[in-house]
């Protein structure tokens, strides 16, 4: 994991406190693991944070006592098994009026804070995620490394895949290769779909054998220093019909048109419209059945979103996917996904490796 220095932590917490002030809450209970890590650098798998105007509390159990003493010495730590009770007691001690909590909190956890908190409790969503969406230089560097590994992984698939291998074998071979190259692990179960299964946008790998002349789609993301890539490529294992080649050319052009429009100030709705309109003009509109993309970072799906209903404007430092696809039953499915850094004056393609039509 990328080490979060105390300077980085203080800066991120200060940004959150500014948001808290605008929303009239004087405490923020952080339970999402990625948000917990982002603000504190704590890599333990259990615990919560409580951010108030003057304090940064890290509440966890004795398994992590030595770890936080070493990695988070500036945080005020509490070792307990009653995380939520302790957070509520701290709010009472500070005479706080309103405690925000993440709307992803389970109902059973909500029930606890609803009963114990003397402060009003306020559900919020997307607040820390919006802060996370604009990456710092260290985060961008980690994602670039993850994308570089993805390019090596795709080439490995092209070099090693043979007819008769199962989709699961390809997925497992890729997993071994990526980890050997320095990846920590996958951010989602890799999609390896062949033949008719390429028309399933999220067709995870099965025991199906890949046959000669199959179309193959691979969609995978791997962590490097805690940050992930997300890339999709489609290629052919042998000759394909003109219908498949036309679909591929259409998806590739939609990808290129959409990527070319990425810049600070454009919104996700407009980016989606550009690629979707082109696909529709080519007669494939009903076969593009998902959004154009999403943010990536500590999680595989982050803000900002790129789709028909998303009006948020892109900011420099955000990293998004652009992933148009066409899935025609009985013919084949094609998706081409790239990871794009939004810059001050445009964009940078981080997955800048072959996306041309290939028959291996």
Image (cartoon, rainbow, N blue to C red):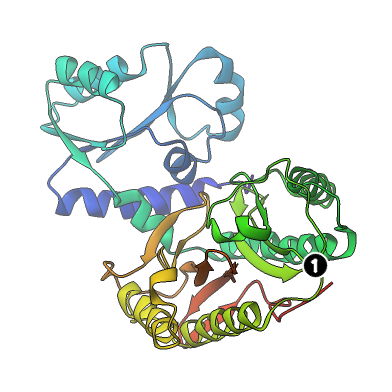
273 or 19, nearer to the observer: 273
Question: Residue 106 location in percent, x, y?
Answer: 31, 26
Q: Give the residue at mark 1.
A: 237
The residue depicted at 52 percent of the width and 56 percent of the height is 297
Indicate left or right for 195 with 161 as reference: left
Indicate left or right for 202 with 183 as reference: left
140 relative to 114, above or below: below
Question: Residue 359 location in percent, x, y?
Answer: 80, 75
128 or 341, nearer to the observer: 341
The residue depicted at 56 percent of the width and 47 percent of the height is 4
- Total marks shown come to 1
Residue 5 can be seen, yes or no = yes
Question: Residue 332 location in percent, x, y?
Answer: 60, 67
Instruction: Specify the quadrant that holds the C terminus.
Output: bottom right
206 relative to 29, above or below: below
Quadrant in which residue 163 is drawn? bottom right
182 or 58, nearer to the observer: 182
50 relative to 349, above or below: above
Which structural element holds mark 1? loop
231 or 277, nearer to the observer: 277
Question: Residue 135 location in percent, x, y?
Answer: 49, 63
The residue depicted at 59 percent of the width and 45 percent of the height is 188
Indicate left or right for 16 with 341 as reference: left
345 relative to 201, above or below: below
Indicate left or right for 40 with 222 as reference: left
Residue 229 can be seen, yes or no = no
């Amino acid at each position: 994991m990328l080490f979060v220095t105390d300077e980085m932590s203080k800066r991120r917490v200060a940004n959150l406190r500014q948001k808290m002030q605008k929303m009239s809450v004087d405490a923020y209970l952080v339970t999402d693991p990625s948000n917990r890590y982002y603000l504190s650098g704590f890599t333990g798998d259990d615990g919560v944070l409580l951010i108030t105007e003057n304090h940064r509390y890290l509440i966890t159990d004795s398994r992590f006592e030595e770890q936080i003493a070493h990695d988070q010495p500036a945080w005020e730590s509490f070792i307990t098994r009653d995380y939520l009770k302790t957070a509520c007691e701290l709010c009472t001690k500070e005479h706080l009026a309103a405690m925000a909590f993440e709307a992803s909190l389970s109902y059973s956890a909500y029930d606890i804070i609803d009963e114990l908190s003397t402060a009003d409790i306020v559900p919020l969503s997307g607040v820390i995620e919006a802060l996370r969406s604009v990456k710092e230089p260290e985060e961008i560097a980690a994602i670039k490394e993850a994308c570089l590994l993805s390019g090596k992984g795709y080439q490995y698939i092209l070099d090693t895949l043979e007819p008769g291998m199962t989709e699961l074998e390809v997925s497992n071979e890729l997993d071994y290769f990526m980890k050997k190259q320095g990846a920590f692990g996958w951010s989602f179960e890799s999609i390896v779909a062949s033949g008719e299964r390429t028309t399933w946008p999220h067709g995870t790998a099965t025991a199906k054998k890949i046959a000669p002349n199959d179309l193959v789609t691979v969609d995978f993301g791997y962590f490097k220093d805690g940050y992930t890539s997300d890339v999709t490529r489609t290629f052919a294992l042998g000759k394909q019909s003109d219908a498949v080649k036309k679909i591929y050319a259409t998806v590739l052009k939609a990808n290129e048109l959409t990527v070319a429009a990425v810049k600070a100030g454009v919104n996700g709705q407009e980016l989606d419209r550009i690629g979707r309109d082109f696909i529709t003009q080519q007669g494939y509109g009903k076969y593009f059945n998902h959004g154009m993309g999403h943010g990536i970072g500590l999680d595989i799906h982050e803000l900002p979103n790129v789709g028909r209903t998303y009006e948020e404007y892109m900011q420099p430092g955000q990293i998004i996917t652009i992933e148009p696809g066409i899935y025609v039953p009985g013919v084949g499915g094609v998706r081409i996904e790239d990871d794009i850094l939004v810059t001050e004056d445009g964009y940078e393609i981080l997955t800048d490796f072959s996306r041309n039509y290939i028959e291996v």
